[in-house]
Image (cartoon, grey):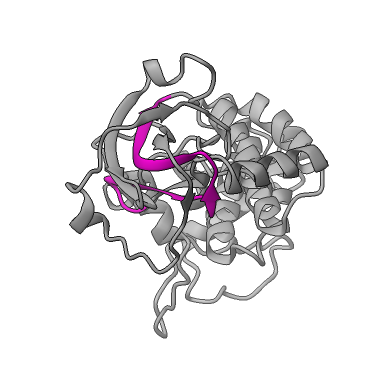
């Protein structure tokens, strides 16, 4: 740990390279890359900077030769905005061009990307040192997802909203009314006869309604693009390799292993919901119901929608029927 810290400090204060590189999506078509210039250098001074892009991490001796040089910037540049027209993951690196001489950063120096983008110093010799996490990114970044154009996102966003009903209005899918003993009075008029029949079928009554249609998979917006790291990234990888591919048995196993470790609360909540979905698509409705009930207080409207669908799809085996018509 001491060696790494010392090496990083040396790179920031003595070597003519950028550091603390960061790349993040700023819109559905742009990614902004930023970095920090060294406080001072000895023997070499920066005369310009070059930004490289690749679909793989830019590391190793031949990394720059197979990467695309997308911009040459003035020596005092601290950011660059890359415009893209696809949804692929990209990695970035910033390389300094230098000439002999010492350099000390002027913290009062003003830099504006738009004004200075054509004012490149040029010349110099490339200082081709790549340090992952220092002047080359270690996590891929893609532009923001166009949520409005995504049918799944549109549906799930609406489902996550709390709905307020006027007096006398019916809910789209009311919770089941169970007349198990058969001696209750007329049910509340807000519950239709059709709903009552569906509920009775869950405890052995004759099923008279049409076959329920399973819900489409739900994805939280936080998991629709690759995070920079941490628990969010680990959950993203689990979903990408199993859940998105609709390999729900594998997703169930992976999510159980994921939840066996201590995670942040927000990530844990989302993982529990995905586990409920995985059980749901595996036909294990009792286990799915348990997961959705566990997370109901966190995702109230969304969980209730999946609870109701789970109850619709669940059928009590004929051997357990204790009610006759």
The image quarter containing residue 29 is: top left
Q: Residue at x 57, y 60 (%)?
A: 304
Span shown in magenta = 26-55
Q: Is residue 174 magenta?
A: no
Q: Looking at this view, is 273 or 52 the one in front? A: 52
Q: Looking at this view, is 216 or 94 the one in front? A: 94
- Residue 251 appears in the picture as rendered: yes
Residue 70 point in image, percent of width and height: 28, 33
Q: Looking at this view, is 324 or 220 the one in front? A: 220
Q: Residue at x 73, y 57 (%)?
A: 294
Q: Looking at this view, is 321 or 77 the one in front? A: 77
Image quarter of the N terminus: top right
Residue 114 point in image, percent of width and height: 20, 56
| As drawn, 278 above or below 307 | above
Q: Is residue 45 magenta?
A: yes
Residue 227 lies left or right of residue 24; in this view the side is right
Residue 313 point in image, percent of width and height: 57, 41
Residue 88 point in image, percent of width and height: 37, 31
């Amino acid at each position: 740990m001491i060696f790494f810290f010392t090496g990083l400090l040396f790179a920031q204060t003595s070597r003519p390279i950028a550091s603390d590189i960061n790349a993040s999506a700023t819109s559905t078509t742009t990614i902004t890359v930023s970095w920090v210039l060294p406080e001072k250098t000895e023997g070499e001074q920066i005369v310009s900077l070059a930004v490289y892009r690749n679909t793989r991490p830019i590391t190793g001796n031949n990394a720059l030769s197979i990467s695309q040089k997308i911009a040459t910037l003035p020596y005092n540049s601290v950011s660059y905005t890359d415009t893209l027209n696809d949804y692929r993951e990209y990695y970035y690196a910033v390389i300094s061009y230098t000439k002999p001489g010492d350099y000390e950063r002027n913290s009062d120096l003003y830099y504006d990307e738009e004004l200075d983008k054509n004012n490149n110093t040029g010349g110099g010799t490339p200082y081709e040192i790549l340090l992952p996490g220092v002047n080359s990114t270690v996590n891929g970044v893609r532009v923001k997802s166009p949520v409005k154009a995504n049918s799944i996102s549109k549906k799930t966003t609406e489902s996550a909203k709390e709905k307020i009903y006027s007096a006398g209005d019916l809910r789209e899918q009311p919770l089941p009314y169970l007349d198990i003993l058969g001696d209750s009075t007329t049910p509340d008029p807000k519950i239709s006869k059709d709903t009552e029949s569906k509920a009775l079928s869950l405890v052995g009554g004759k099923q008279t309604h049409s076959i329920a249609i399973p819900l489409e998979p739900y994805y939280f917006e936080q998991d629709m693009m690759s995070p920079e790291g941490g628990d969010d990234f680990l959950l993203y990888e689990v979903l990408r390799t199993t859940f998105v591919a609709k390999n729900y048995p594998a997703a169930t196993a992976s999510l159980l292993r994921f939840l066996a470790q201590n995670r942040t609360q927000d990530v844990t909540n989302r993982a529990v919901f995905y586990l409920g979905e995985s059980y749901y698509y595996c036909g294990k409705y009792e286990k799915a119901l348990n997961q959705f009930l566990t997370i109901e207080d966190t995702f109230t409207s969304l969980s209730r929608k999946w609870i109701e669908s789970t109850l619709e799809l669940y059928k009590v085996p004929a051997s357990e029927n204790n009610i006759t018509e």
